[in-house]
Image: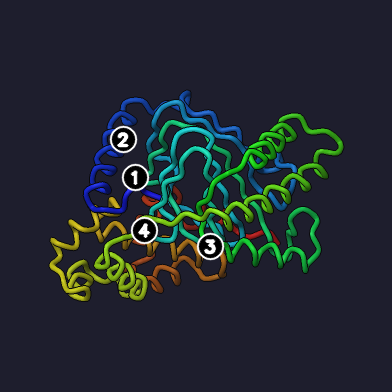
Protein backbone atom coordinates (compact mmCIF):
# COMPACT_ATOMS: atom_id res chain seq x y z
CA UNK A 1 0.00 0.00 0.00
CA UNK A 2 1.05 3.67 -0.21
CA UNK A 3 2.93 4.71 2.94
CA UNK A 4 0.26 7.28 3.85
CA UNK A 5 -3.14 7.67 2.24
CA UNK A 6 -3.36 11.41 2.98
CA UNK A 7 -3.67 13.73 -0.06
CA UNK A 8 -0.38 15.51 0.67
CA UNK A 9 1.55 12.23 0.84
CA UNK A 10 -0.08 10.97 -2.35
CA UNK A 11 0.79 14.21 -4.16
CA UNK A 12 4.39 13.97 -2.95
CA UNK A 13 4.57 10.36 -4.12
CA UNK A 14 3.22 11.29 -7.56
CA UNK A 15 5.79 14.10 -7.85
CA UNK A 16 8.58 11.63 -7.07
CA UNK A 17 7.12 9.16 -9.58
CA UNK A 18 7.11 11.76 -12.35
CA UNK A 19 10.69 12.79 -11.50
CA UNK A 20 11.77 9.15 -11.94
CA UNK A 21 9.76 9.00 -15.17
CA UNK A 22 11.66 12.00 -16.53
CA UNK A 23 14.93 10.18 -15.92
CA UNK A 24 13.52 7.06 -17.55
CA UNK A 25 12.82 9.01 -20.75
CA UNK A 26 16.57 9.48 -21.15
CA UNK A 27 17.63 5.98 -20.02
CA UNK A 28 15.22 3.39 -21.38
CA UNK A 29 17.41 0.99 -23.32
CA UNK A 30 16.64 -2.73 -23.17
CA UNK A 31 20.19 -3.30 -21.85
CA UNK A 32 18.89 -1.98 -18.52
CA UNK A 33 16.33 -4.81 -18.27
CA UNK A 34 16.99 -8.50 -17.64
CA UNK A 35 13.79 -10.49 -18.12
CA UNK A 36 14.35 -14.19 -17.48
CA UNK A 37 10.81 -15.43 -18.09
CA UNK A 38 10.01 -19.03 -19.02
CA UNK A 39 6.88 -19.30 -21.16
CA UNK A 40 5.64 -20.42 -24.59
CA UNK A 41 6.92 -23.97 -24.21
CA UNK A 42 9.92 -23.15 -22.02
CA UNK A 43 7.85 -23.32 -18.83
CA UNK A 44 7.94 -26.60 -16.92
CA UNK A 45 4.19 -26.76 -16.16
CA UNK A 46 1.28 -26.08 -18.55
CA UNK A 47 -0.73 -24.96 -15.51
CA UNK A 48 1.98 -22.33 -14.87
CA UNK A 49 2.07 -20.50 -18.23
CA UNK A 50 4.74 -18.01 -17.13
CA UNK A 51 7.42 -17.92 -14.46
CA UNK A 52 10.50 -15.78 -14.23
CA UNK A 53 12.80 -13.33 -12.51
CA UNK A 54 12.99 -9.74 -13.76
CA UNK A 55 15.63 -7.15 -12.96
CA UNK A 56 15.51 -3.48 -14.01
CA UNK A 57 18.77 -1.63 -13.48
CA UNK A 58 17.26 1.73 -14.41
CA UNK A 59 13.73 3.15 -14.49
CA UNK A 60 12.02 2.20 -17.76
CA UNK A 61 8.91 3.64 -19.40
CA UNK A 62 6.20 1.90 -21.42
CA UNK A 63 6.33 -1.25 -19.28
CA UNK A 64 3.64 -2.89 -17.14
CA UNK A 65 0.92 -1.83 -19.61
CA UNK A 66 -2.78 -2.50 -18.78
CA UNK A 67 -3.57 -6.21 -18.97
CA UNK A 68 -6.12 -8.78 -17.82
CA UNK A 69 -5.99 -12.59 -17.62
CA UNK A 70 -9.47 -14.20 -17.61
CA UNK A 71 -8.46 -17.61 -16.24
CA UNK A 72 -5.01 -17.07 -14.79
CA UNK A 73 -3.80 -15.80 -11.41
CA UNK A 74 -0.76 -13.53 -11.32
CA UNK A 75 1.73 -13.23 -8.47
CA UNK A 76 4.52 -10.66 -8.07
CA UNK A 77 7.10 -11.13 -5.30
CA UNK A 78 9.50 -8.19 -4.93
CA UNK A 79 13.13 -9.02 -4.16
CA UNK A 80 14.59 -5.48 -4.29
CA UNK A 81 13.10 -2.06 -4.95
CA UNK A 82 9.37 -1.32 -5.15
CA UNK A 83 6.59 -1.93 -7.71
CA UNK A 84 3.62 0.43 -8.00
CA UNK A 85 0.41 -1.13 -9.36
CA UNK A 86 -3.22 -0.35 -9.91
CA UNK A 87 -5.36 -3.49 -9.54
CA UNK A 88 -9.15 -3.38 -9.93
CA UNK A 89 -9.13 0.37 -9.37
CA UNK A 90 -6.99 0.35 -6.22
CA UNK A 91 -3.38 1.57 -5.86
CA UNK A 92 -0.85 -0.86 -4.39
CA UNK A 93 2.79 -0.30 -3.50
CA UNK A 94 4.77 -3.56 -3.24
CA UNK A 95 8.09 -3.32 -1.43
CA UNK A 96 10.97 -5.75 -0.99
CA UNK A 97 9.84 -8.84 0.87
CA UNK A 98 6.18 -8.45 -0.16
CA UNK A 99 3.92 -10.31 -2.57
CA UNK A 100 0.99 -9.00 -4.64
CA UNK A 101 -1.72 -11.42 -5.83
CA UNK A 102 -3.84 -10.49 -8.87
CA UNK A 103 -6.98 -12.56 -9.38
CA UNK A 104 -8.34 -13.76 -12.74
CA UNK A 105 -10.22 -11.11 -14.70
CA UNK A 106 -8.79 -8.12 -12.81
CA UNK A 107 -7.49 -5.22 -14.88
CA UNK A 108 -4.01 -4.21 -13.69
CA UNK A 109 -1.11 -2.03 -14.77
CA UNK A 110 1.95 -0.24 -13.46
CA UNK A 111 1.54 3.34 -12.31
CA UNK A 112 2.35 5.64 -15.24
CA UNK A 113 3.48 2.45 -17.09
CA UNK A 114 6.75 2.98 -15.25
CA UNK A 115 9.06 0.13 -14.29
CA UNK A 116 11.27 1.39 -11.45
CA UNK A 117 14.71 -0.05 -10.63
CA UNK A 118 14.53 -3.33 -8.74
CA UNK A 119 14.02 -7.05 -9.11
CA UNK A 120 11.12 -9.43 -8.58
CA UNK A 121 9.65 -12.82 -9.40
CA UNK A 122 6.55 -13.06 -11.62
CA UNK A 123 4.36 -16.14 -11.68
CA UNK A 124 1.18 -16.99 -13.61
CA UNK A 125 -0.80 -20.04 -12.56
CA UNK A 126 -4.16 -21.62 -13.37
CA UNK A 127 -6.67 -23.31 -11.10
CA UNK A 128 -9.45 -24.08 -13.58
CA UNK A 129 -10.87 -27.49 -14.46
CA UNK A 130 -8.62 -27.81 -17.52
CA UNK A 131 -5.36 -27.01 -15.73
CA UNK A 132 -5.29 -28.33 -12.19
CA UNK A 133 -2.21 -26.98 -10.54
CA UNK A 134 0.32 -29.36 -9.02
CA UNK A 135 -1.55 -32.50 -10.05
CA UNK A 136 -4.41 -31.81 -7.62
CA UNK A 137 -7.73 -33.57 -8.07
CA UNK A 138 -10.89 -31.53 -8.72
CA UNK A 139 -11.85 -31.22 -5.04
CA UNK A 140 -8.36 -30.17 -3.95
CA UNK A 141 -8.09 -27.67 -6.78
CA UNK A 142 -11.48 -26.15 -5.86
CA UNK A 143 -10.43 -25.90 -2.21
CA UNK A 144 -7.19 -24.09 -3.10
CA UNK A 145 -9.02 -21.75 -5.49
CA UNK A 146 -11.55 -20.84 -2.79
CA UNK A 147 -8.79 -20.32 -0.26
CA UNK A 148 -6.87 -17.95 -2.54
CA UNK A 149 -10.05 -16.16 -3.61
CA UNK A 150 -11.07 -15.65 0.02
CA UNK A 151 -7.80 -14.13 1.22
CA UNK A 152 -8.38 -11.01 3.36
CA UNK A 153 -5.90 -9.01 1.28
CA UNK A 154 -3.88 -9.21 -1.92
CA UNK A 155 -0.64 -7.78 -0.48
CA UNK A 156 1.26 -9.66 2.18
CA UNK A 157 4.77 -10.32 3.51
CA UNK A 158 6.98 -13.06 2.11
CA UNK A 159 8.75 -15.48 4.42
CA UNK A 160 12.21 -16.96 3.91
CA UNK A 161 10.72 -20.35 2.87
CA UNK A 162 8.78 -18.61 0.08
CA UNK A 163 11.92 -16.91 -1.24
CA UNK A 164 13.78 -20.23 -1.09
CA UNK A 165 11.02 -21.97 -3.07
CA UNK A 166 11.08 -19.25 -5.74
CA UNK A 167 14.86 -19.52 -6.08
CA UNK A 168 14.61 -23.29 -6.44
CA UNK A 169 11.85 -23.00 -9.05
CA UNK A 170 14.06 -20.66 -11.04
CA UNK A 171 16.97 -23.09 -10.80
CA UNK A 172 14.80 -25.95 -12.12
CA UNK A 173 13.73 -23.84 -15.10
CA UNK A 174 17.30 -22.84 -15.86
CA UNK A 175 18.63 -26.42 -15.86
CA UNK A 176 15.71 -28.81 -16.26
CA UNK A 177 16.25 -32.44 -15.24
CA UNK A 178 14.05 -35.50 -15.96
CA UNK A 179 12.28 -35.01 -12.63
CA UNK A 180 12.07 -31.20 -12.78
CA UNK A 181 8.36 -31.20 -13.65
CA UNK A 182 7.45 -33.23 -10.57
CA UNK A 183 9.62 -31.07 -8.36
CA UNK A 184 8.13 -27.89 -9.86
CA UNK A 185 4.63 -29.17 -9.05
CA UNK A 186 5.58 -29.79 -5.42
CA UNK A 187 7.38 -26.44 -5.10
CA UNK A 188 4.47 -24.49 -6.56
CA UNK A 189 1.98 -26.10 -4.19
CA UNK A 190 4.27 -25.34 -1.24
CA UNK A 191 4.61 -21.75 -2.46
CA UNK A 192 0.86 -21.13 -2.68
CA UNK A 193 0.11 -22.69 0.70
CA UNK A 194 2.87 -20.63 2.35
CA UNK A 195 1.43 -17.48 0.78
CA UNK A 196 -2.08 -18.34 2.01
CA UNK A 197 -0.73 -18.62 5.55
CA UNK A 198 1.26 -15.38 5.28
CA UNK A 199 -1.74 -13.45 3.96
CA UNK A 200 -3.98 -14.70 6.76
CA UNK A 201 -1.48 -13.68 9.45
CA UNK A 202 -0.45 -10.19 8.30
CA UNK A 203 -2.72 -8.72 5.62
CA UNK A 204 -2.16 -5.25 4.17
CA UNK A 205 -4.74 -2.88 2.76
CA UNK A 206 -4.70 -0.53 -0.23
CA UNK A 207 -4.50 3.23 0.04
CA UNK A 208 -7.94 4.67 0.73
CA UNK A 209 -9.25 6.87 -2.07
CA UNK A 210 -11.34 9.96 -1.24
CA UNK A 211 -15.10 9.37 -1.06
CA UNK A 212 -15.74 11.58 -4.09
CA UNK A 213 -13.28 9.62 -6.22
CA UNK A 214 -14.77 6.30 -5.06
CA UNK A 215 -18.24 7.55 -5.95
CA UNK A 216 -17.05 8.70 -9.38
CA UNK A 217 -15.47 5.29 -9.99
CA UNK A 218 -18.79 3.64 -9.17
CA UNK A 219 -20.57 5.91 -11.66
CA UNK A 220 -17.99 5.10 -14.34
CA UNK A 221 -18.27 1.35 -13.74
CA UNK A 222 -22.07 1.43 -13.85
CA UNK A 223 -22.17 3.51 -17.04
CA UNK A 224 -19.30 2.09 -19.11
CA UNK A 225 -21.56 1.47 -22.10
CA UNK A 226 -22.87 5.05 -22.04
CA UNK A 227 -19.48 6.69 -22.39
CA UNK A 228 -20.41 9.40 -19.87
CA UNK A 229 -18.77 12.79 -20.13
CA UNK A 230 -16.60 14.15 -17.32
CA UNK A 231 -19.26 16.82 -16.74
CA UNK A 232 -21.94 14.15 -16.27
CA UNK A 233 -19.76 12.17 -13.86
CA UNK A 234 -18.93 15.32 -11.88
CA UNK A 235 -22.62 16.24 -11.65
CA UNK A 236 -23.46 12.75 -10.39
CA UNK A 237 -21.02 13.12 -7.47
CA UNK A 238 -21.89 16.80 -6.82
CA UNK A 239 -18.60 18.49 -7.70
CA UNK A 240 -17.45 20.62 -10.63
CA UNK A 241 -15.54 19.03 -13.53
CA UNK A 242 -12.46 21.02 -12.49
CA UNK A 243 -12.68 19.74 -8.90
CA UNK A 244 -13.10 16.16 -10.11
CA UNK A 245 -10.10 16.51 -12.40
CA UNK A 246 -7.92 17.83 -9.57
CA UNK A 247 -9.00 15.02 -7.22
CA UNK A 248 -8.27 12.29 -9.77
CA UNK A 249 -4.86 13.64 -10.74
CA UNK A 250 -3.88 14.08 -7.08
CA UNK A 251 -4.95 10.60 -5.92
CA UNK A 252 -4.81 8.16 -8.84
CA UNK A 253 -2.42 9.95 -11.19
CA UNK A 254 -4.82 10.11 -14.15
CA UNK A 255 -7.56 12.45 -15.31
CA UNK A 256 -11.18 11.19 -15.07
CA UNK A 257 -11.28 10.74 -18.84
CA UNK A 258 -8.05 8.71 -18.84
CA UNK A 259 -9.34 6.51 -16.03
CA UNK A 260 -12.70 5.97 -17.78
CA UNK A 261 -10.86 4.98 -20.96
CA UNK A 262 -8.80 2.42 -19.03
CA UNK A 263 -11.94 0.96 -17.48
CA UNK A 264 -13.64 0.64 -20.88
CA UNK A 265 -10.58 -0.99 -22.46
CA UNK A 266 -10.31 -3.33 -19.46
CA UNK A 267 -13.91 -4.45 -20.01
CA UNK A 268 -13.16 -4.83 -23.73
CA UNK A 269 -10.23 -7.11 -22.87
CA UNK A 270 -12.50 -9.21 -20.66
CA UNK A 271 -15.09 -9.56 -23.43
CA UNK A 272 -12.52 -10.31 -26.13
CA UNK A 273 -10.87 -13.03 -24.03
CA UNK A 274 -13.97 -14.69 -22.57
CA UNK A 275 -16.64 -14.40 -25.29
CA UNK A 276 -16.98 -14.91 -29.04
CA UNK A 277 -18.34 -11.38 -29.59
CA UNK A 278 -16.94 -9.65 -32.66
CA UNK A 279 -14.74 -6.57 -32.32
CA UNK A 280 -17.58 -4.50 -33.82
CA UNK A 281 -20.06 -5.82 -31.25
CA UNK A 282 -17.67 -5.17 -28.36
CA UNK A 283 -17.12 -1.62 -29.62
CA UNK A 284 -20.87 -0.97 -29.80
CA UNK A 285 -21.47 -2.56 -26.39
CA UNK A 286 -18.99 -0.15 -24.78
CA UNK A 287 -20.40 2.92 -26.50
CA UNK A 288 -17.63 3.65 -29.01
CA UNK A 289 -18.70 5.60 -32.08
CA UNK A 290 -17.25 3.01 -34.44
CA UNK A 291 -15.13 -0.13 -34.56
CA UNK A 292 -12.31 1.93 -36.08
CA UNK A 293 -12.37 4.40 -33.17
CA UNK A 294 -12.46 1.54 -30.67
CA UNK A 295 -9.51 -0.18 -32.38
CA UNK A 296 -7.45 3.01 -32.30
CA UNK A 297 -8.09 3.59 -28.58
CA UNK A 298 -7.48 -0.09 -27.78
CA UNK A 299 -4.16 -0.04 -29.58
CA UNK A 300 -3.03 3.12 -27.77
CA UNK A 301 -3.80 1.49 -24.41
CA UNK A 302 -2.46 -2.04 -25.01
CA UNK A 303 0.03 -1.69 -27.84
CA UNK A 304 -1.95 -4.10 -30.05
CA UNK A 305 -5.13 -3.97 -32.17
CA UNK A 306 -8.08 -5.89 -30.67
CA UNK A 307 -7.85 -8.95 -32.93
CA UNK A 308 -4.12 -9.41 -32.34
CA UNK A 309 -4.59 -8.99 -28.58
CA UNK A 310 -7.41 -11.54 -28.57
CA UNK A 311 -5.26 -14.10 -30.43
CA UNK A 312 -2.72 -13.99 -27.61
CA UNK A 313 -5.24 -14.14 -24.77
CA UNK A 314 -7.59 -16.95 -25.74
CA UNK A 315 -7.99 -19.41 -22.82
CA UNK A 316 -6.55 -22.87 -23.35
CA UNK A 317 -9.06 -25.43 -24.60
Distance between the alpha carbons at the discs numbered 2 and 4? 20 Å
Query: Dot 3 lies on which element?
Result: loop
| Residue where numbered disc 1 is placed | 112
Closer mark to the observer between disc 1 and disc 3: 3
Residue 152's disc is 3
Residue 291, position in %: x, y?
Answer: 38, 65
Residue 262's disc is 4
**Relative depth, front residue between 169 and 274:** 169
Along the polypeptide, which appears first: circle 2 or circle 1?
Answer: 2
Q: Quadrant of the C terminus?
A: bottom right
Distance between the alpha carbons at the discs numbered 1 and 4? 12 Å
| Residue where numbered disc 2 is placed | 21
Q: Are marks 2 and 1 in contact (CB under 8 Å)?
A: yes
On the rendered structure, is 62 left or right of 23? right
Along the polypeptide, which appears first: circle 2 or circle 4?
Answer: 2
Distance between the alpha carbons at the discs numbered 1 and 3? 27 Å
Q: Are marks 1 and 4 in contact (CB under 8 Å)?
A: no
Q: Residue at image x 44%, y 57%? A: 205
Closer mark to the observer between disc 3 and disc 2: 3
Closer mark to the observer between disc 2 and disc 4: 2
Query: Dot 4 lies on which element?
Result: helix
Query: Dot 1 lies on which element?
Result: helix
Amino acid sequence: MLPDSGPSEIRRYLTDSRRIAAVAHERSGVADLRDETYELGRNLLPEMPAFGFIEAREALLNRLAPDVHPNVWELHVVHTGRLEFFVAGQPWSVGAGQALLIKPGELHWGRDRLLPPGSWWRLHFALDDRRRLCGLNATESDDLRRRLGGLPARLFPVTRPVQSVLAQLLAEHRRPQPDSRLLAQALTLELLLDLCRAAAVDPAQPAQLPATVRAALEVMTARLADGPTVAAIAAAVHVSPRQLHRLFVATVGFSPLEWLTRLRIGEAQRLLSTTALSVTTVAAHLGFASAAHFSAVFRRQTGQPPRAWRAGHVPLA
